[in-house]
Image (cartoon, rainbow, N blue to C red):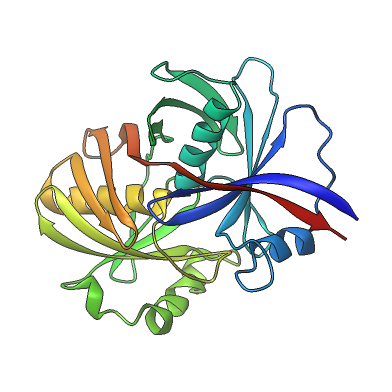
């Protein structure tokens, strides 16, 4: 049995286990290892696991795994939390912009006290489908505007979109949003790989803000997720969405040790 040190962080209720592989000595983790760690009754409990490692020309590399053990190309709130983790490890400094790399490409970020501003990838295609819109903000998202997100039975309604043939064999994440004011929206997200609703989803919050922008013409949003409030800003010419920033809390919850079998 090997003891594996970890830290747990949360960003607006989206919670993650952080693992340090800066020295390249982290044991290889299987899909079942990751799923066991994320289990909320028999493990640590998390929406996913992030691993920080060295990468030439960047401050660090981020690798993200969903709670079912599957690899994902990106996670917005996870990325903000790993930036806070990197600051705790001394890899980056408060108040200074830095670059890191993930499987969806490079990103910029800035850390302040329990808050991280994160630059997301540009979005150059938004497709109308199934009464909503589909776009990729690092991972694929379907967004549907409703009058009241609280009235949505998300565990009943989301799976049909999650697995719809229009989104291919991999499927999609699903977001329901309500526009409360031209620059204020409420969002609930069913996450692929978690296969349930999470308290917040960074890539989904960005996707939802872009969907709302099509309706309102705004490019700054206060976003109210189940787990807290975040902010989104971008520049748009009506076709492409660039200089996309997601901002919100990133807070360490605790340190711990996981006993690997």
Query: Which of 79 and 173 lies nearest the eye of the viewer?
Result: 79
Q: Is residue 22 left or right of residue 10?
A: right
Tell me if residue 105 comes above or below residue 49 in the rendering. above
Tell me if residue 197 comes above or below residue 22 in the rendering. below
User: What number of labels is visible?
Assistant: 0
Work out which residue is located at the far right of the displayed protein and give it. Answer: 1
Name the residue rendered at 82%, 49% in the picture: 3
Q: In the image, residue 11 lies at what x, y percent?
A: 42, 48
Query: Which of 75 and 137 lies nearest the eye of the viewer?
Result: 75
Residue 126 appears anywhere in the view: no
Q: In the image, residue 229 lies at what x, y percent?
A: 27, 50
Query: Which of 167 and 23 lies nearest the eye of the viewer?
Result: 23
Q: Is residue 84 left or right of residue 204?
A: right
Work out which residue is located at the far left of the displayed protein and give it. Answer: 181
Quadrant holding the C terminus: bottom right
Tell me if residue 135 comes above or below residue 233 in the rendering. below
Name the residue rendered at 43%, 20% in the picture: 94
Tell me if residue 25 comes above or below residue 160 in the rendering. above
Residue 63 appears anywhere in the view: yes
Name the residue rendered at 12%, 44% in the picture: 217
Occupied quadrant, residue 161: bottom left
Occupied quadrant, residue 22: top right
Q: Is residue 106 left or right of residue 187?
A: right
Quadrant holding the N terminus: bottom right
Q: In the image, residue 108 lies at what x, y percent?
A: 45, 25
Q: In the image, residue 129 lies at what x, y percent?
A: 34, 65
């Amino acid at each position: 049995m090997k003891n594996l040190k970890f830290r747990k962080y949360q960003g607006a209720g989206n919670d993650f286990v952080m693992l340090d592989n800066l020295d390249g000595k982290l044991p290889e983790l299987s899909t079942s290892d990751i799923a066991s760690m994320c289990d909320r009754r028999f493990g640590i409990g998390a929406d996913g696991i992030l691993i920080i490692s060295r990468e030439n020309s960047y401050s660090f590399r981020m690798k993200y795994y969903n709670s079912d053990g599957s690899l994902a190309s990106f996670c917005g709130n996870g990325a903000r939390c790993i930036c806070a983790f990197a600051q705790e490890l001394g890899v980056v400094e408060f108040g200074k912009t830095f670059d890191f790399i993930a499987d969806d490409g490079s990103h910029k970020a800035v850390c302040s006290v329990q808050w991280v501003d994160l630059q997301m990838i540009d979005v150059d295609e938004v497709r109308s489908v199934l009464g909503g819109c589909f776009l990729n903000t690092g991972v694929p998202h379907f967004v549907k505007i409703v009058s009241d997100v609280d009235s949505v039975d998300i565990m009943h309604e989301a799976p049909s979109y999650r697995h719809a043939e229009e989104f291919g064999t991999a499927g999609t994440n699903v977001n329901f949003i309500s526009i409360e004011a031209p620059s204020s929206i409420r969002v609930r997200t069913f996450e692929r790989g978690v296969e349930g609703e999470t308290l917040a989803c960074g890539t989904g919050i960005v996707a939802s803000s872009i969907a709302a922008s099509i309706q309102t013409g705004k490019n700054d949003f206060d976003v109210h997720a189940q787990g807290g409030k975040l902010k989104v800003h971008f520049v748009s010419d009506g076709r492409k969405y660039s200089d996309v920033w997601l901002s919100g809390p990133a807070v360490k919850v605790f340190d711990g040790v996981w006993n690997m079998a």
